[in-house]
Image (cartoon, rainbow, N blue to C red):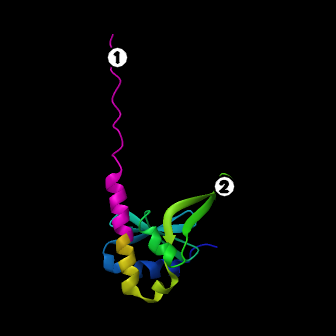
Amino acid sequence: MDTSPDFLDFAQELFAPLGGVSVRRMFGGAGLYCRGLMFGLIHDDTIYLKADAETAKAFEARGCGPFTYEGKGKPVQMSYWQMPADLIDDADEAVAWAKTALGVARAQKAATPPPARRQPVRRRF
């Protein structure tokens, strides 16, 4: 099943209070971005939010699981967790969870070292 355009519009509108929210299609689903930083994804009309080891506990407590896909013969688990279904009807609470996911995304980006610059090879003749 693919993600419907109407659901993508709904998700963008739901998280609009974050400011600068965009949706980009990818691999049959879509990424949710806030000012260029991915904080969630959408697959089969289901929203998944970025989580770390600490925030994943809140998702688990609500009976939600991580996004997984089949990769080279075995399932691969990503750091995005299904948003609790009841938040679809509670925009304020959905935005609060998205703010937490955005904080996780920012922290992970800050902790990632910049890519090493390639040094030119100097030849001596």
- Three-letter residue code for mark 2: Lys
Q: Is residue 12 magenta?
A: no
Q: Is residue 68 shown left or right of residue 15?
A: right
Quadrant holding the C terminus: top left
Can you say whether 74 is above or below 100 in the image? above
One can see residue 34 in this view:
no
Q: Which mark is residue 74?
A: 2
Residue at the far bottom: name it: 89
Q: How many neighbours does mark 2 have within 10 angstroms: few (below 14), some (14-19), or many (20 or more)?
A: few
Q: Where's residue 40, x and y in %?
A: 45, 69
Q: Position of residue 124 (x, y in %)?
A: 32, 13
**In this picture, is 46 found above or below 114?**
below
Residue at point 37%, 57% (across, down): 108
Numbered disc 1: secondary structure: loop
Label 1 CA crowd tier, 10 Å (few <14, some 14–19, many 20+):
few
Query: Would residue 60 appear left or right of 111 to someone viewing this image?
Result: right
Label tally? 2
The kind of residue on which mark 1 rests is Arg
Mark nearer the N terminus (1 vs 2) = 2
Image quarter of residue 98: bottom left
Residue at 42 percent of width and 88 percent of height:
90
Q: Is residue 27 left or right of residue 15?
A: right
Residues drawn in magenta: 101-125
The question of residue 107 being in magenta is answered with yes
